[in-house]
């Protein structure tokens, strides 16, 4: 888990909002339903019935969380540069037997129409389940990508990007092939669990007979507003996770994260490549460590994310600082030291993960960890060199296990009147 994650708190710049027609409250087409008029009956302790007319519940306008809206159409697809969302679903599909380019194009057209409506806080185009009837957009984003196998299935091998070549094997991998890769990949995120689930069901239903689910993973992050002030979120190890993530304001951000408009292949202009990994955290072993030992593994203080060399969370790490015994203050195998871009030829990626918890194994250990999602213009220059370095001696590797993996080409955003992937499928 490289120490380069996305700024975790949503700021006004981290989500695109659309002015609401009701003067700023952001109430969507799925109008908030009031609950006024309810009455109640309270029973006394001795069993005698004492009636009280309950005051009518007041209809409450959508909160800022519910009214946050990301835009479907744009230069880039949504779900890449927006702030972390409270709920997420990652799902991969394989095209059905006999389905090819024509069926894939029809599917992406359906998916895009559904995503546009749901992200606006509206009902699905058909057979809406009403799960999110009362909610606003809740910062919903839906993102689509293509796996390596998609191009062979659709006869588009000549359009497959070289950057989509399979990732190399890493010695720490223990990958479950059934939960890896896939022809198509969809990322869904929202700040409300029902809104996220509603989108997931709509996408699954839209797949119809054209594609079947290969795997699905469900995750979460801290809810916006849960802390007294915006701050970097913590992962399930209790560490601040995201301090050194590239920021959109960085001069070289677009160069590192997005394929240029003049890039190859042309259909990937303004797109990005997503590496997706299910990383299990061995929490029972991790939690046996003292806080001092945990901090040595990471290279940062647990309380505030500051480097062990001193300062605050954003203070540059002093890799040469030594203690009175001559030992590096930031250990040589500390995770934060190994993942620094200046130690990896400038390699950088935009991490946008979700935590997950899938219950308890039969031996009593929690199946929990990180749904790692990172974005880069070229994974061979972003994820791969950093992971190779981690593979050779990261102190954190003792406490994590990579259990599934996928790499997906995520094309640029759809313009008005277009669907995602149209330039590939109809080019």
Image (cartoon, rainbow, N blue to C red):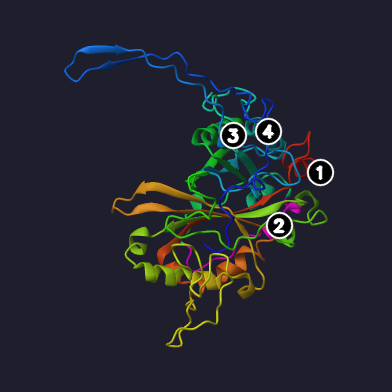
Q: Residues within 10 Å of mark 2 (few under 14, many from 20)?
A: few
Left or right of 419, for residue 350: left
Q: Write down the region rendered in magenta.
A: 157-173
Tell me the SS state at disc 1.
loop
What residue is rendered at 50% in x and 69% in y? 335
Q: Earlier in the sequence, mark 2 or mark 4?
A: 4
Residue assigned mark 2: 249
Q: Nearer the viewer, mark 3 or mark 2?
A: 2
Q: Residue 137 at x, y = what percent?
A: 60, 33
Residues at marks 1 and 4, CA–CA distance in whole angstroms: 22 Å
Q: Nearer the viewer, mark 1 or mark 4?
A: 4
Q: Residues within 10 Å of mark 4 (few under 14, many from 20)?
A: many
Q: Earlier in the sequence, mark 1 or mark 2?
A: 2
Tell me the SS state at disc 2.
loop
Residue 341: quarter of image: bottom right
Residue assigned mark 4: 116
Q: Nearer the viewer, mark 1 or mark 3?
A: 3
Residue 414: quarter of image: top right
Tell me the quarter of the image containing the C terminus: top right
Residue assigned mark 1: 427
From where the camera sits, is residue 209 visible? no
Q: Residues within 10 Å of mark 3 (few under 14, many from 20)?
A: many
Tell me the SS state at disc 3.
helix
Left or right of 26, for residue 420: right
Q: Are marks 3 and 2 in contact (CB under 8 Å)?
A: no
Q: Is residue 181 magenta?
A: no
């Amino acid at each position: 888990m490289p120490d380069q994650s996305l700024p975790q708190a949503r700021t006004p710049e981290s989500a695109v909002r659309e002015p609401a027609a009701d003067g700023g409250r952001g109430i969507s087409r799925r109008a908030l339903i009031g609950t006024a008029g309810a009455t109640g009956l309270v029973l006394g302790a001795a069993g005698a019935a004492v009636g009280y007319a309950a005051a009518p519940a007041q209809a409450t306008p959508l909160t800022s969380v519910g009214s946050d809206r990301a835009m479907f159409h744009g230069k880039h697809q949504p779900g890449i540069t927006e702030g972390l969302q409270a709920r997420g679903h990652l799902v991969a599909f394989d095209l059905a037997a006999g389905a090819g380019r024509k069926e894939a194009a029809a599917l992406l057209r359906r998916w895009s129409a559904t995503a546009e409506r749901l992200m606006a806080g509206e009902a699905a185009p058909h057979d809406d389940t009403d799960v999110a009837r009362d909610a606003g957009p809740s910062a919903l984003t839906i993102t689509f990508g293509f796996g390596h196998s998609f191009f062979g299935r659709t006869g588009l091998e000549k359009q497959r990007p070289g950057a989509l070549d399979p990732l190399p094997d890493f010695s720490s991998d223990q990958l479950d092939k059934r939960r890896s890769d896939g022809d198509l990949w969809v990322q869904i995120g929202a700040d409300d669990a029902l809104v996220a689930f509603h989108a997931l069901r709509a996408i699954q239903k839209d797949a119809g007979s054209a594609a079947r689910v290969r795997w699905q993973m469900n995750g979460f992050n801290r809810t916006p507003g849960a802390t007294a002030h915006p701050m970097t979120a913590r992962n399930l190890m209790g560490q601040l996770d995201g301090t050194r993530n590239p920021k959109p304001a960085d001069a070289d951000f677009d160069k590192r994260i997005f394929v240029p408009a003049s890039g190859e292949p042309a259909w990937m202009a303004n797109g990005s490549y997503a590496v997706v990994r299910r990383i299990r955290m061995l929490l029972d072993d991790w939690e046996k460590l003292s806080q001092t030992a945990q901090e040595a593994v990471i290279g940062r203080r647990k309380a505030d994310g500051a480097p062990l060399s001193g300062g605050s969370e954003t203070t540059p790490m002093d890799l040469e600082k030594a203690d009175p015994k001559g030992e590096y203050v930031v250990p040589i195998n500390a995770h934060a030291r190994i993942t620094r871009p200046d130690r990896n030829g400038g390699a950088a990626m935009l991490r946008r993960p979700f935590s997950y918890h899938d219950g308890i194994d039969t031996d009593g250990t929690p199946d929990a960890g990180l749904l790692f999602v990172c974005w880069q213009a070229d994974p061979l220059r972003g994820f791969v060199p950093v992971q190779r370095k981690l593979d050779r001696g990261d102190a954190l590797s003792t406490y994590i296990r990579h259990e599934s993996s996928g790499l997906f080409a995520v094309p640029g955003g759809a313009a008005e009147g277009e669907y995602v992937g149209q330039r590939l499928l109809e080019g």
